[in-house]
Amino acid sequence: MARILFAGLGVMGAPMARHLARAGHALLLFNRTHHKAQHLALDLGATAVTDPGEAAATADVFITCVGDDSDVEGLAEAALPRMRAGALFIDHTTTSAALPRRLAERHAHLHVVDAPVSGGQAGAEAGTLSAMCGGSPEAFAAARPLIAAYTRVQGHVGPAGHGQLAKMVNQIAIAGVVQGLAEALAFGRRAGLDMEAVLAVVSKGAAQSWQMDNRAATMLEGRFDFGFAVDLMRKDLGLVLAEARTHGARLPLTALVDQFYADVQGMGGQRQDTSSLIRRLL
């Protein structure tokens, strides 16, 4: 079993840490709000730490699930130089693609894997996330058995940074689907349709999607408390649009949906989940 330093114990990180503890790994837990680490450590029989750099020196693996590039880079620069050669760094944060490439080059003595996930809080709790993993084949082989504790799918998509690029593909696809579903539901309601009856039919045909199956009813009910917040989606779409500019990729729908999410933020929906796009239309 591995000795794992895990940093970032929010709605995604805490369930991931629980799955690792259940798998028998020894955990060192770090969170900027230390009492969260203390509380979870007590529950899991783990150890809460206040200095990730010091803790990393004794760890086989360092896993991060934090907010953005600056959070990851700060933790990495404190911890990675102190880890032994051949140790493993896995980052589940959604970041720029440039960051993992830079970390892999700077810390070549380590196996570095960028492994953003999809599936939200419910997926983290159920252990059914999908992980898009960038890094060398050797790094992925080392990371995969650990990541499997809280994921259903672990895919190696290329070298360092490609995990983040794959997550951008994921977010582009989701943005368009959620907007399309929001428009369909709003149209149906304004047309006076029995939307429960309509959804029972169209969800069995070509219009079916995860979003329709899991969010259509709650969108119509005005319930938007399912974990992945609008603020986080806008952060992700900002990364997507910046990356698209470097490749000359045209993303007109994604740019438009990003502005629609800005409208939702302006309506006070910063912490509501991404299905709250429908608020603009009803």
Image (spheres, grey):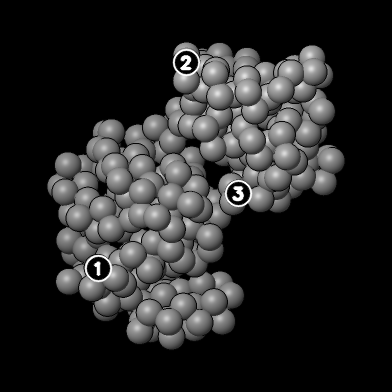
Quarter of image, res 136: top left
Location of mark 3 (residue): 226
Judge by depth and name the residue closer to the eye, 105 or 111. 111
Answer with left or right where residue 192 lies relative to residue 139.
Answer: right
Residue at x-position 23% and y-position 73%: 24
Location of mark 1 (residue): 23
Judge by depth and name the residue closer to the eye, 63 or 228. 228
Residue type pointed to by label 1: Ala
Q: Are marks 3 and 1 in contact (CB under 8 Å)?
A: no
Judge by depth and name the residue closer to the eye, 210 or 174. 210
Judge by depth and name the residue closer to the eye, 90 or 36. 36
Answer with left or right where residue 77 lies relative to residue 214.
Answer: left
Residue type pointed to by label 3: Phe
Residue at x-position 41% and y-position 75%: 29
Q: Position of residue 279 (x, y in %)?
A: 78, 34
Regarding residue 201, the answer to whether it shows in the image is yes
Quarter of image, res 230: top right
Q: Position of residue 201 (x, y in %)?
A: 54, 18
Location of mark 2 (residue): 205
Q: Nearer the viewer, mark 1 or mark 2?
A: 2
